[in-house]
Amino acid sequence: MSKKLENTLATHLSFQGESLQYFRNSQEIDFLLEDKIPLQVCYTLSEPTTFEREIQGLIKYLEFAGSKTGYIITWNESKTIKKGNKTINILPAWYFLLFGMHP
């Protein structure tokens, strides 16, 4: 289901005129939007190992890129996580599709 959600968001972003890129080093970032805003797509973060993997991957990218904010799009979860000076906004897909990245 995660791949279907990722494909849905890729299609939506393309229709919005976004130039889709990704990043892969020791971690993978699903989409890098304009201004190098990282966007991860994960169906659910309910499993502790998945939650930790996704959060740590974004934190590593934010440190690498010198950015402060990243996003994780899930099926229906919502939360804001702060780690030091980094912020990760977790948004449900329905919200992202309607309103974008404004929690």
Image: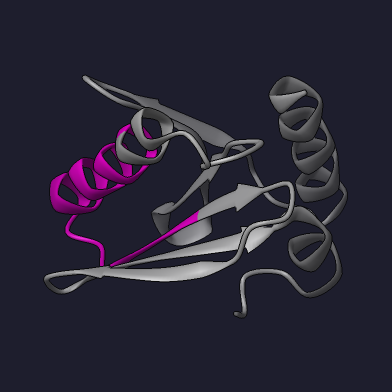
Question: Left or right: where does residue 47 sit relative to residue 24?
Answer: right
Question: Left or right: where does residue 5 sit relative to residue 56?
Answer: right
62 in magenta: yes
Which image quadrant for residue 95?
Answer: bottom right
Against 62, residue 8 (above or below) is above
Residue drawn 66% across the image and 36% down it: 43
Residue 68's x, y, as percent? 26, 68
Residue 22's x, y, as percent? 48, 30
70 in magenta: yes
Residue 14's x, y, as percent? 80, 43
Residue drawn 17% across the image and 59% down it: 66
Q: How is the structure coloured here?
A: one colour
Q: Which residues make up the magenta segment? A: 53-71
Quadrant location, the C terminus = bottom right
Residue drawn 19% across the image and 42% down it: 60
Residue drawn 77% across the image and 42% down it: 9
Q: State the residue in front, 49 or 66.
A: 49
Q: State the residue in front, 78 or 11.
A: 78
Against 82, residue 71 (above or below) is above
Which image quadrant for residue 48?
Answer: top left
Q: Residue furthest front?
A: 47
